[in-house]
Amino acid sequence: MFKCHAQPVAKEEYPLFAHRDDPDTSFDAAKTLVASGELTKQETEVWNWGRKFQTTAGITPKELASKLQSKHYGNYHAVYHKIQRRLSGLEQKSKVERFLVGDKQLVRNKSGVWRFI
């Protein structure tokens, strides 16, 4: 078994934006996101994308990001992470739901399937 003998890294050596290093900045960023209306804008954007591109079999965040990448919405990874970050909020607002088979979420290509309502 591999054992790591690295010395602990001083707190100051982490990047300032790291959540572990300074969670207050993460909370400040979240407050700014909500107060500026950017959160609502991003959720609406993701919801509109999902409604436009989903099929009757639902859509995964990976599939949606692939479709958007070809439509010049940005690089695949940035779009994918934007979609992933907004799904839980949209689910709480009943705008998306997990595509269930029995009591488990359907998975395609290692990604959960969602239905945009």
Image (tube, rainbow, N blue to C red):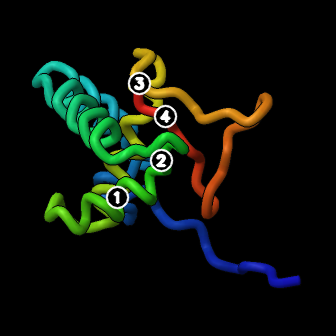
Could you tell me residue 96's position as x and y percent? 45, 27
Residue that numbered label 1 is attached to:
65
Q: Is residue 33 left or right of residue 23?
A: left
| Among the two numbered marks 3 and 1 on one chain, the one whose residue lies closer to the N terminus | 1
Question: Mark 4: which secondary structure?
Answer: strand
Residue of label 4: 115
Residue type at mark 1: give it.
Answer: Ala
x, y percentage for residue 77? 34, 65
| 20 shown above or below 30 | below
Find disc 2 in the rendering and name its residue. Answer: 59
Closer to us: mark 2 or mark 1?
2
Query: Which residue extends farthest top?
Result: 93
Q: Which residue appears farthest toward the left when viewing the image?
A: 36
- Mark with earlier residue (4, 1): 1
Q: If you read the primary sequence from the N terminus, does the residue marked by circle 2 or circle 4 appear first?
A: 2
Q: Is residue 75 above or below residue 99?
A: below
CB-based contact (under 8 Å), mark 3 and mark 4? yes
How far is disc 2 from disc 1 in space, using C-alphas? 10 Å
Residue 87 against residue 110 in the figure, above or below: above
Of circles 3 and 1, the one toward us is: 3
Residue type highlighted by circle 2: Ile
Which one is earlier in the sequence, the residue at label 2 or at label 1?
A: 2
Q: Quadrant of the N terminus?
A: bottom right
According to the image, label 3 marks what residue? Answer: 117
For the residue carrying disc 4, how many other residues have a C-alpha within 10 Å: few (<14), some (14-19), or many (20+)? many
Q: Residue at 39% x, 41% y: name it.
A: 85
CA separation in Å, label 3 and label 1 = 18 Å
Q: Secondary structure at mark 3?
A: loop
Location of residue 15 by image quarter: bottom left
Write down the quadrant of residue 73 in the picture.
bottom left
